Image (spheres, rainbow, N blue to C red):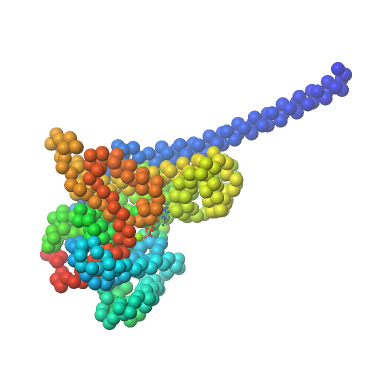
């Protein structure tokens, strides 16, 4: 071989080696990056762990906090608010009643016709409207006038029979923490779920709505002021007398239940003819060191307008799940370029709404085309490889599973407090299966539960794990569609027909 040929051959060999080294180097780097992304997922999984042991600790903490909140004002992060609802609809209610449901993304007006026999809601009419963003943080008068106008319009649309001069009774579902002063009045404690109308905090809510109705000349009386959970419990109980609690899992989350008045220690001398009263837990504000908290939760909370508040809600409800997932994907894309350069949409808080997150989670196409579409169109992350798309689905799964399992633990916490979790007899040496468990129904409402199959399935699974099959078979979760609104109309019916107030504060 001549010198030239040898030189060329050597040159080629060197170049080949260099190219190979670059390729190998790139592979090593990309493997390292992939490892880092997988590390983010692993860390998330570990910090979101909800073993049944941990869930039982949450159950106990919930029951303990309920006791503390009932013992004294400010005794717990659980407010355990009195509702003054001391009787749930009996089924004998008759006539046409209205309800307004304000408390989340949509606001609803309802008209319900009751036939006077159990379970006979003869007719109902619902109109949904989104609340204009600017009204959520403006002046209270603007919001209430907007609501009153919608009610007026709704009434005008009603048939002629409805246009009588008889005063109409209205149930007002207002799903924010309210210090109730009677069944038809209460003072707003604080806003949640993104509302921030400053001049309404500390004000009497039903009275303010009544004034707005009067301004519009509507012959309508706010007969009851209730929380959405209370409306849901009312409708649940109307259909099934074994209903003892209600849970909402939608934009926010909350629960209420039927409590004996003698257990409401902070309100000594509370007397009701029924001996009980519905207690609005405001469980969104529940907190316990047993809750599995991640760095994403801490950051989300710190950046929220209500930090240190609504800790349970921030782990569970529809307002936040998509946002937690967005934060995890952002972290992943900062750790590696697997998602390309960080897009401005991905950096924008709340850009991933929970229904879209649910769509990604439930994408069962082999190529995960829905995940690719949402990543591209919503978060502006195009061309994500399949293995990274699978990772995104896993993130959704971890976040939703934790949320659903915590909600299940919360429900069992209520059952434990009222002795319906089957645990009270165990100390006597009897096995769980010997305990005579009463049929126990929990009414559930909210789109996260009703629309998100994986969420619902995880919740049911956890309920069975915590309670055990023998007990769980006696606990029924029942969807009470539109319960928050129809229930308020039912309560308006039962309270407007009562001439005497049953509740006495001695
Ligand atoms: P609200 O709580 O506002 O009264 P909903 O009970 O309908 O009303 O809950 C709405 C919330 O539920 C939305 O903010 C969203 O987070 C969540 N949601 C709605 N649809 C879905 C869905 N298909 N999958 C998952 N979450 C959903
Ligand atoms: Mg609702």
Taking 314 as reference, is 89 above or below it? below
Judged left or right of residue 35, residue 6 is right
Taking 97 as reference, is 263 above or below it? above
Q: Quadrant of residue 387?
A: top right
Taking 46 as reference, is 313 above or below it? below
- Image location (x, y in percent) of residue 320: 42, 52
User: Quadrant where the C terminus lies?
Assistant: bottom left
Q: How many marks?
A: 0
| Viewer-proximal residue among 41 and 374 | 374
Q: Who's the residue at 52% across and 36% down the image?
A: 36
- Image location (x, y in percent) of residue 409: 29, 45
- Image location (x, y in percent) of residue 157: 38, 76
- Image location (x, y in percent) of residue 46: 41, 37
User: Quadrant where the N terminus lies?
Assistant: top right
Q: Who's the residue at 30% across and 77% down the image?
A: 162
Q: State whether residue 328 appears in this view.
A: no
Judged left or right of residue 394, residue 264 is left
Q: Who's the residue at 36% across and 45% down the image?
A: 457
| Viewer-proximal residue among 317 and 36 | 317
Q: State whether residue 391 appears in this view.
A: yes
In the image, farthest residue toward the top: 1
Q: Quadrant of ligand 1?
A: bottom left
Q: Who's the residue at 38% across and 61% down the image?
A: 104
Judged left or right of residue 45, residue 82 is left
Q: Quadrant of residue 185?
A: bottom left
Q: Quadrant of residue 175?
A: bottom left
């Amino acid at each position: 071989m001549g010198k030239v040929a040898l030189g060329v051959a050597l040159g080629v060999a060197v170049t080949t080696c260099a190219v190979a080294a670059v390729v190998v180097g790139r592979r090593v780097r990309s493997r390292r990056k992939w490892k880092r992304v997988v590390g983010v997922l692993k860390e998330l999984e570990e910090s979101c762990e909800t073993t049944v042991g941990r869930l039982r600790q949450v159950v106990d903490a919930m029951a303990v906090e309920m006791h503390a909140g009932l013992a004294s004002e400010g005794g717990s992060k659980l407010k355990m608010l009195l509702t003054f609802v001391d009787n749930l609809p009996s089924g004998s209610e008759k006539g046409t009643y209205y309800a307004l449901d304000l408390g989340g993304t949509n606001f609803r007006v309802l008209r319900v016709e009751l036939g006077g026999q159990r379970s006979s809601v003869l007719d109902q009419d619902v109109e949904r409207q989104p609340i204009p963003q600017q009204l959520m943080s403006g002046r209270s008068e603007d919001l209430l006038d907007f609501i009153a106008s919608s009610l007026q319009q709704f009434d005008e649309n009603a048939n002629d029979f409805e246009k009588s001069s008889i005063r109409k009774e209205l149930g007002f579902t207002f799903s924010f923490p309210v210090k109730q002063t009677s069944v038809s009045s209460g003072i707003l404690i604080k806003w949640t779920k993104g509302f921030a109308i400053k001049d309404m905090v500390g004000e009497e809510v039903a009275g303010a709505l009544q004034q707005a109705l009067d301004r519009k000349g509507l012959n309508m009386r706010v007969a009851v002021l209730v929380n959405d959970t209370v409306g849901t419990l009312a409708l649940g109980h109307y259909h099934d007398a074994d209903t003892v609690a209600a849970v909402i899992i939608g934009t926010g989350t909350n629960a209420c239940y039927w409590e004996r008045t003698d257990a409401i220690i902070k309100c000594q001398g509370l007397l009701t003819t029924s001996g009980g009263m519905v207690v609005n837990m405001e469980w969104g504000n529940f907190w316990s060191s047993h809750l599995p908290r991640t760095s994403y939760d801490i950051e989300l909370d710190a950046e929220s307008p209500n930090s240190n508040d609504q800790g349970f809600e921030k782990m569970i409800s529809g307002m936040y799940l998509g946002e937690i997932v967005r934060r995890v994907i952002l972290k992943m894309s900062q750790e590696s370029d697997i998602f390309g350069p960080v897009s401005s949409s991905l950096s924008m808080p709340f850009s991933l709404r929970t229904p879209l997150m649910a769509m990604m989670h439930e994408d069962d196409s082999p190529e995960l085309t829905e995940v690719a579409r949402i990543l591209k169109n919503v978060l502006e992350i195009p061309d994500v490889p399949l293995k990274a798309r699978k990772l995104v689905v896993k993130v959704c799964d971890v976040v939703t599973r934790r949320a659903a399992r915590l909600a299940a633990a919360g429900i069992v916490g209520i059952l434990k407090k009222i002795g319906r979790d089957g645990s009270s007899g165990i100390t006597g040496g009897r096995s769980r299966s010997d305990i005579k468990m009463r049929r126990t129904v929990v009414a559930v409402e909210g789109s996260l539960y009703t629309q998100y199959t994986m969420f619902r399935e995880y919740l049911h699974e956890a309920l069975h794990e915590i309670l055990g099959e023998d007990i769980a078979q006696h606990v029924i979760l029942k969807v009470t569609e539109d319960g928050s609104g129809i229930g308020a109309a039912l309560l308006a019916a039962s309270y407007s027909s009562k001439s005497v107030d049953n509740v006495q504060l001695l």
